[in-house]
Every structure is written in C-alpha cells, then in structure tokens.
Image: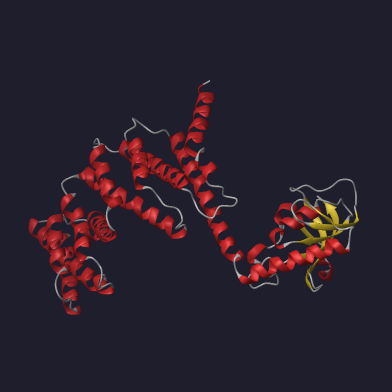
Amino acid sequence: MRKIFLSLSVIVLMLVATGCQQKETNPATDTETTSAFNDSISEALGNYYGSLFKQDFSQRDSVINNAKFLKGMRTALYADSASFIGMTIGLGLKSEMETAPYFAKIDFDSKIVNEHLLEAFNCDSVSLQELQQVTQKIDELITKSMTDSSQVINESSSVCYGKLVGLRLNSDLIQQDKNFDKKQLIKGIEMVFVKSVDDEDFAMGLSAGAQLRGDMAMFNRNFEFVKFNNGVVLKAVAKMIKRPAVSHEEMVLYQHSLDSLTAIVKQVGVNRQLAAAASTDEAIMGDRTGEAFIDNLLKSDPTIKQSASGLCYKIHEPGSDVKPTADNTLVVHYTGKHIDGTVFDSSVDRGEPAEFMVNQVIPGFGEGLQLIGKGGKATLYIPGKLGYGPQGTPGGPIKPNETLIFEIELIDIK
C-alpha cells in the first residue's frame, strides 16, 4: 500500500508541477513562451535548486539560518550587472584563497585582501614591472608559508594577494570597457569580502544565488525568449529549504519536471528557427512553386489522390494486403526527382535497395510507404511541408520548401 501511495503522490506532484504551463505554450507551433509558462519554468527551476540546497543543508553539522541564506540569494539575483560581475569575481577569488593547494598554509584576512585590492584597482596606471614584482612577492610568501605559518606571513600574503588581484583587474577588465561602472563592480566585490565575511549563511546564499543566476544567464544565451521570474524562483527555493526534508524521489521528480519544460523550450527554439527559415524569399518561392505544381497535377491526372496531410500519390501496384506500420523496417527501392524530372537520389541507380524504419524518413515519404503492401509500387508527390521543410538540405540538393517526386517500390517488410 505504501508504494502505491508514493506513486500516486508523485503523479499528483507531477500534475501540479507541470500541468498548467503545457496548456499555455504549445511546443508544436509556438515561437514564443507565455508569461504563465515563464513562471512555471521559473518555479520548476526554483524547486529543483531549492531541493539541492536543502540536501546540502542536511549534510552540514550546523543549522542554516534560512532568512540569511535567502537574503544572500536575493542580493545576488537582483544585483545590477556590474555588481554581479564584482560578486562573481569576489566569490572566485575567495574560493581560490580557501581551496587552492598553493594557499593551503595561508590564513587570509578577507578585509585586508579587499582593502588592498580596491587600492590597486583604483590606481591610475599599471605597469608590467609592478605586476611582475607583486607576482614574485606572492610566490615567495607561498614558499615561506610551507615552513612559517605566522601571523606576519598571513597578513603579508593578504596584502600582496589583494594588490595583485586589484592590479590585474585594473589592467585587464576595466581597460577593455571604458564605460564599465567601477563603483558598482567594487560594491559587488565588497559584498563578498566585507559584508559576508562575518555571516557564513549570508555568504552561502550569495554564492548559491550567483550560481543560480549564472545558470539562468547561460540558459538565456541559448533561449533568449524565456524570461525567468526571480521572485517566483526565490519563492520556490524558500519553500524547499523551509521544509523539514526533501526525499530522493521528490528530487527526481523536480529534475524530471524541469527537464520536461526544457524540452518544450528547445522545441519552441526549433519553431523559431523554422519560422525564420520559412520567411526567406527562397522558401516562399519554393512554397508557391510547389503549390502551383500540385494544383496542375491534380487537374491533369484524376487518378492522383491527395491525403488529408497534403501528400499526393498514385498507386501503380497495391502489393500485398499487409501494409507497414511506423515501427517497421522496410526494404525499398526509390528514385527521388525534382519537379522538373531531374534525379537527385536513386537506390535503383546504385543497384542496391535502401533499408530503414518508416519513422526515420521525411513525413511524406513515410506516409506514402504505408499506403502500399509488400511488392507495391507508387509515385509520391511530396510538398515541402512534408519533405525537408523551409530549411531544405543546407549545401545539398533540396531547396527550401521544395516539392519532391519519389517513385517507390516496397520490396520487403521486416
């Protein structure tokens, strides 16, 4: 009974997590996502990451202050771009200070690092000689720290490391963009090295928020039409981390829900690409030429039939009564032609029949194969929408939205 109850619970949660958004965005045709869908994927993202954070909390010895953690996350998610870059720089440096093997014997003072970082960052110019001198100095301190772990070494290392980083930032980052907001970048760095140094839970939230924001930005680089709602994301994270526990089964569910929505997003992205391809002059011309060809064909030869999908066909020999299904593997001889009669591909010319599954070929070809039985022969007139579509075969013989003719013989059904 318990397993059945668990299965039902998972199904209910799945419906709650994914039910509404799939009605709002139709992955088969849409080229944009609705605000409701964006909120849904934001919630799914928050649920998944929140469950990961909660799992991490459960493995720590100390109790995490949820309010401080969420404050850190909120700070990272809502920071302006320059401040956020400063935060990510600071978090990266802090991670290096705490985990790099070459700094294993050094106990850095974050406030001293920050002070000298900002001083070097704000200087008017940076010379290569100065960078080399500071680099050499920090190398010497690392060597000394192996045998001397005194406070003097720690403080000197903090001063030197901060200066080195500040000089590099000054030289590499700001000079590349004269309009960059230095004050906001400094604000982000100080957020890590000063404001979070005495508040571990806030620092954890800041790091988690930066990670989440970075992942959302990476997602948006591929799918800019998805607009994450930070408020919805934070609310979902808060809900997760405030729970007593999150089971493994639930974590799998949240991952599956996010994956399902991501699959919809990918299809919408494909739809956008197809829509862009369909609007080109070549695709529009291919569509019009094909329509005119089909119209003339149907008028000139009444034995040619047209299916509901738009496929036109003429059966020369019906073959056996047993017809293939979408899952069958077929042995076929075919000749593919342009509407001017030019052959672009032929298994007959190669002297060997082709073998493939029905669902592995273009839609019109697969539909036509299922109209005849073993030994049957037919001619298919496939419009562009049932062929290679508005993209055609880039670099190949098929133009965008081109109507094609296939003479087929179904030799065997496996």
Residue at 89 percent of width and 54 percent of height: 375
In the rendered image, the residue lying farthest to the top is 1
Image position of 98 (left or right of 41): left
Residue at 34 percent of width and 44 percent of height: 231
Looking at the picture, tell me which residue is in the foreground, 400 or 408. Answer: 400
Looking at the picture, tell me which residue is in the foreground, 77 or 139. Answer: 77
Residue 223 image offset from top left, x and y in percent: 47, 57
Residue 188 image offset from top left, x and y in percent: 22, 57
Residue at 24 percent of width and 35 percent of height: 63
Looking at the picture, tell me which residue is in the foreground, 127 or 32. Answer: 32
Please, is residue 229 above or below residue 279 in the view? Answer: above
Q: How is the image coloured?
A: secondary structure
Q: Is residue 147 visible?
A: no
Query: Looking at the image, how many numbered discs can be counted on the residues?
Result: 0
Residue at 62 percent of width and 71 percent of height: 281
Looking at the picture, tell me which residue is in the foreground, 372 or 150. Answer: 372
Residue 194 image offset from top left, x and y in percent: 15, 53
